[in-house]
Image (cartoon, helix red, strand yellow):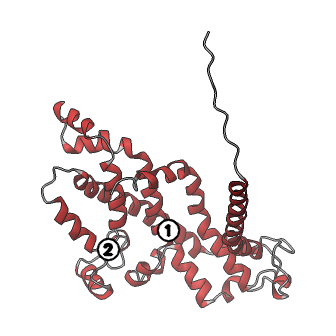
Amino acid sequence: MSKVKVKSRKPQGIGSRVFDVVNGILLAVIGIIMFYPMFYVFIVSISSSQYINQGLVSFLPKGINFEAYKVVFGNKAIWSGYKNTFLYAISGTLINLVCTSLCAYPLSRKDLYGRGPITVLITVTMFINGGLIPTYLVINQLHLLNTMWAIVLPPAISTYNMIVMRTSFSSIPESLMESAYLDGANDIQILLKIILPLSKPIMATMTLFYAVQHWNSYFPAMIYLNDQAKYPVQVIMRDIVIQGDLSADIAGNVNVIATNYKYAVIIISVIPILMVYPLLQKYFTKGVMVGAVKG
């Protein structure tokens, strides 16, 4: 019976171990620096007003209470903003995914006539756009002002995201598509039954990108909407945080001041989108890497 030689793994040198330790410490410090602002917002939102006024809240909450959240959830405008934001984010993300995949798929095909010039023309839009006033005039002429479509249609496709998706589609073997053609499939069937099922990581990544973009968007709503009942929660949060008109909301509640009320609004506005990320995390890293493999 022949003996199988197993090569022992060479132990790490001192330099490698030092690098790992320093790298771990550096990443931990950066992580703490990035996490602390949101943590501070949260602990202030649940701290007592007297400790906040004295500047005693730094690393741990003091006088824990949830009065600020009770006041926030009692604000009908917040609930209306939540409903509108979910509507804009879900419908806008669906439109984004459809438009981006329909543009990325043909550009990923090497047999597309004029693929190079078309790609250049599309890429130019990343650097040159019509500007705010011409865009506003176009939306006005299309009678989209003060409607949901003014929020979800103008950003229907992101050139950067389309290029990433096109690169991901290009990594799929052409032999799969050629065999599908031999079986009588057309391009729509190939896209729906072959390309998209094999592109779950990049589709999940694009879903996260677009959903975050819509959730955080507030400027288009400020420009194109004039009905407060249609405002997303980000616009309502901006009015509360910047304008500071809180007298009617916190009147008579000695446990709530403007600071922890504002911070409570910030927390409830970011929690939903933070809950989406863990669901897509396993696809996220893979999707970004797949989209960056080929140029």
Instruction: Give the amino acid at mark 1.
Output: Trp
**Residue under the point 29% across and 43% down:** 192
**Residue under the point 63% across and 24% down:** 5
In the depicted structure, whether residue 273 falls above or below residue 58: above
Extreme residue toward the top, this view: 1
Q: The C terminus lies in which quarter of the figure?
A: bottom left
Q: In this figure, which residue is indicated by the disc labeled 1?
A: 215
**Residue 142: which quarter of the image?**
bottom left
Left or right of 136 on screen, residue 30: right
Left or right of 283 on screen, residue 269: right
Instruction: Give the amino acid at mark 2.
Output: Met
Left or right of 237 on screen, residue 167: left
- Regarding residue 70, the answer to whether it shows in the image is no
- Viewer-nearest residue: 137 or 7: 7
Distance (Cα) linking label 2 and label 1? 21 Å
Mark 1 crowd level (few <14, some 14–19, many ≥20, 10 Å Cα): many
**Mark identifier at residue 227:** none
Q: The N terminus lies in which quarter of the figure?
A: top right
**Residue under the point 30% across and 76% down:** 144
**Residue 15: which quarter of the image?**
bottom right
**Mark identifier at residue 126:** 2
Mark 2 crowd level (few <14, some 14–19, many ≥20, 10 Å Cα): few
Secondary element at image label 2:
loop
**Residue 164: which quarter of the image?**
bottom left
